[in-house]
Image: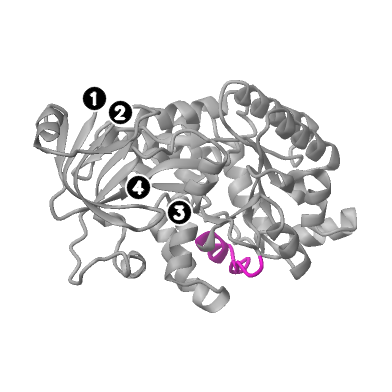
């Protein structure tokens, strides 16, 4: 059933133009939005479910350019016996230990918890980068079904790596290929320092055959560059360029911290995208992102730390005052660039009938001219009242409508404790 948004103050996500009136939201993956012209149309539309938006702001819902479902059950997890000394030890003793212990149920509840958190924060589309090396086959289907149960659209991939040996790498490639035969998605790779030449070549071949892109980490830590120089006698971006990774407009390079001027220029001339994850970079002490000379194709992700895209935008802006050239408008542009990436590549699920109703009681006027200032200094996820995905209500009056969220999260907590025990943390 379609949804009627009455007394709407609508803000176009791309132009920030304001418009008021009554808005009909059409249901379904091909649905759109339609302004009602008169009382007759309003009376006819009133038979649909109606949300009164008086005094509220309505705009396009949000999207995440890089997420890690597999990390959802790590919040509050006891630390490893010895504090990691560097980024590689963070991977080895925390994330690679966690992902090796994931099974069907812990993947499912990780995905459900992520989808619920996303919906509550106004995020209706998630681009995810998954790893579960001891439960590879079918893992992407588990995530897709969980996301769809909550109502979150998605673009998934499995993170292929040689760190577990050739057999695991081949299983990862097969999972990507199996999934891509029936679904939109990307080909996942971990990072250059864990991907050997034959695996990289096979991933690019798979990318080309399915006319998609690669989703991988790039120069997150200095070691990625050091390893590439020592092993392949070239910089990471050069290696990926020669392999054909960055020639696809669907490719997403994640992080991109430790790049020199030559690499930045190379990326800026290619159609690929960069996904910035400022909070994760600070947490891992690997540096702070700068968009200098990278071009305009920069979007925001969370790297699995949370699902709150407004929070990610604020982190990019405030930390960027010391490390980047970023202002209100460019922070908002990066926040919204995920939609541009999805639309320019014809990915489904992020149409006009994905909306968020914001209960934002500002003490100052909100206008087209000052909206990005409100976005940085005023708006946050607590203002998300209602969320609509593909014309379907996911959140109404701040309550998830599609699943029993308290029951799901209760189960997630039990699976988290089971996971922690398998990891030897309890």
Q: Are marks 1 and 2 in contact (CB under 8 Å)?
A: yes
Mark 4, Cα crowd under 10 Å, few <14 / some 14-19 / many 20+, is many
The answer to whether residue 334 shows anywhere in this view is: yes
Q: Earlier in the sequence, mark 1 or mark 3?
A: 1
- How far apart marks 4 and 3 lie (CA) works out to 9 Å
- Spot occupied by residue 317 in the image (x, y as percentages of width and height): 46, 69
Q: Is residue 246 left or right of residue 227?
A: left
Q: Quadrant of the N terminus?
A: top left
Q: Earlier in the sequence, mark 4 or mark 2?
A: 2
Q: Are marks 4 and 3 in contact (CB under 8 Å)?
A: yes
Q: Earlier in the sequence, mark 2 or mark 3?
A: 2
Query: Would you name the residue on which mark 1 appears?
Result: 1
Query: Would you name the residue on which mark 4 appears?
Result: 60
Mark 3, Cα crowd under 10 Å, few <14 / some 14-19 / many 20+, is many
- Spot occupied by residue 152 in the image (x, y as percentages of width and height): 40, 35
- How far apart marks 1 and 4 lie (CA) works out to 19 Å
- Spot occupied by residue 421 in the image (x, y as percentages of width and height): 50, 40
Q: Is residue 360 above or below residue 412?
A: below
**Numbered label attached to residue 336:** 3
Report the span colored magenta: 279-293
Callout 4: helix, strand or loop? strand
Residue drawn at (69%, 31%), measured in percent from left and top?
172
Mark 1, Cα crowd under 10 Å, few <14 / some 14-19 / many 20+, is few
């Amino acid at each position: 059933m379609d949804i009627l948004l009455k007394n709407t103050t609508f803000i176009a996500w791309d132009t920030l133009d304001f418009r008021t009136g009554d808005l009909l939201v059409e249901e379904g993956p091909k649905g759109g939005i339609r302004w009602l012209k008169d009382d007759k149309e309003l009376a006819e539309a009133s038979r649909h479910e109606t949300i009164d938006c008086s005094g509220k702001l309505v705009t396009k819902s949000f999207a995440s350019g890089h997420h890690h479902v597999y990390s959802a059950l790590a919040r509050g997890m006891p630390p490893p016996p010895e504090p990691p000394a560097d980024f590689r030890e963070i991977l080895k003793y925390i994330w690679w230990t966690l992902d090796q212990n994931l099974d069907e149920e812990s993947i499912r509840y990780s995905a459900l918890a992520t989808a619920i958190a996303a919906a509550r924060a106004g995020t209706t589309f998630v681009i995810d980068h998954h790893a579960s090396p001891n439960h590879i086959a079918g893992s992407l289907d588990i995530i897709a079904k969980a996301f769809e149960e909550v109502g979150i659209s998605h673009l998934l991939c499995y993170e292929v790596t040689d760190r577990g040996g050739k057999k695991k790498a081949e299983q990862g490639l097969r999972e990507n290929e199996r999934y891509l035969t029936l679904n939109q998605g990307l080909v996942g790779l971990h990072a250059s320092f864990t991907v050997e030449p034959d695996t990289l070549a096979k991933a690019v071949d798979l990318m080309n055959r399915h006319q998609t892109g690669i989703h991988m980490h790039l120069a997150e830590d200095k070691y990625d560059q050091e390893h590439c120089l020592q092993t392949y006698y070239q910089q990471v971006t050069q290696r990926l360029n020669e392999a054909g990774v960055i020639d696809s407009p669907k490719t997403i390079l994640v992080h991109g911290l430790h790049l020199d001027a030559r690499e930045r220029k190379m990326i800026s001339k290619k159609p690929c995208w960069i996904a910035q994850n400022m909070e994760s970079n600070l947490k891992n002490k690997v540096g702070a992102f700068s968009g200098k000379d990278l071009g305009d194709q920069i979007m925001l992700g969370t790297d699995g730390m949370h699902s709150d895209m407004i929070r990610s935008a604020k982190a990019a802006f405030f930390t960027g005052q010391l490390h980047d050239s970023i202002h209100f408008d460019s922070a908002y542009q990066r926040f919204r660039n995920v939609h541009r990436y999805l639309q320019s590549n014809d990915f489904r699920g992020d149409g006009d009938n994905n909306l968020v109703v914001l209960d934002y009681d500002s003490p100052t006027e909100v206008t087209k001219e000052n909206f990005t200032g409100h976005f940085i200094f005023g708006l946050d996820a607590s203002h998300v009242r209602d969320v609509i995905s593909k014309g379907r209500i996911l959140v109404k009056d701040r309550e998830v409508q599609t699943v029993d969220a308290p029951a799901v999260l209760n189960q997630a907590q039990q699976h988290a404790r089971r996971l922690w025990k398998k990891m030897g943390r309890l």
